[in-house]
Image (cartoon, rainbow, N blue to C red):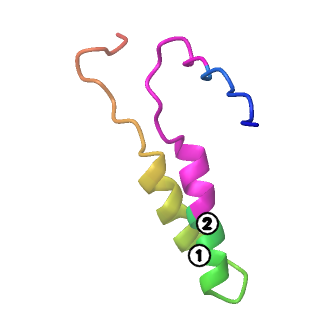
Amino acid sequence: MSEPTRPPLPRQLGRPRTRLPSRSSLTEVVQAQADTTGFVVLDRWAEILERHFPPRRPDPDNVAE
């Protein structure tokens, strides 16, 4: 007897699936902890966060007077 098949999961309201920056950065921090003594120094932590969450640059076309 075969097992019943499950219906396909619905897409998330038509949005494409992308990797979440928070998940990716957390994964990288955990890997960095595993590669060291268990602590990630502040410089390395900031480097990882800036890679996944780049700072926003001011838009010269959208400035308040």
Q: Quadrant of the N terminus?
A: top right
Write the residue at 34% across / 35% down.
57
Q: Quadrant of the C terminus?
A: top left
Q: CA distance from mark 1 to mark 2?
A: 5 Å
Write the residue at 54% across / 18% down.
11
Q: Is residue 41 above or below residue 27?
A: below
Q: Main secondary structure of the magenta part?
A: loop
Residue 9 appears at what percent x and percent y?
62, 23
Q: Is residue 49 left or right of residue 57?
A: right
Write the residue at 23% across / 16% down.
61
Q: Which mark is residue 59?
A: none
Res 42 → quadrant: bottom right
Write the residue at 60% across / 22% down.
8
Q: Is residue 34 left or right of residue 18?
A: right
Q: Is residue 62 magenta?
A: no
Return the residue found at the far left.
61
Residue 4 appears at what percent x and percent y?
73, 28
Q: Secondary structure at mark 1?
A: helix
Residue 51 appears at what percent x and percent y?
42, 55
Q: Is residue 37 above or below residue 21?
A: below
Q: Is residue 6 above or below residue 23?
A: above
> Which amino acid type corresponds to the residue marked 1 in the rendered image?
Ala
Q: Are the residues tagged 1 and 2 within 8 Å (C-beta)?
A: yes
Q: Which residue is mark 2?
A: 29
Res 37 → quadrant: bottom right
Q: Secondary structure at mark 2?
A: helix
Q: Residues within 10 Å of mark 1 (few under 14, many from 20)?
A: some
Q: Which residue is mark 1?
A: 32
Q: Is residue 49 above or below residue 1?
A: below
Region in magenta = 10-27
Residue 29 appears at what percent x and percent y?
61, 66
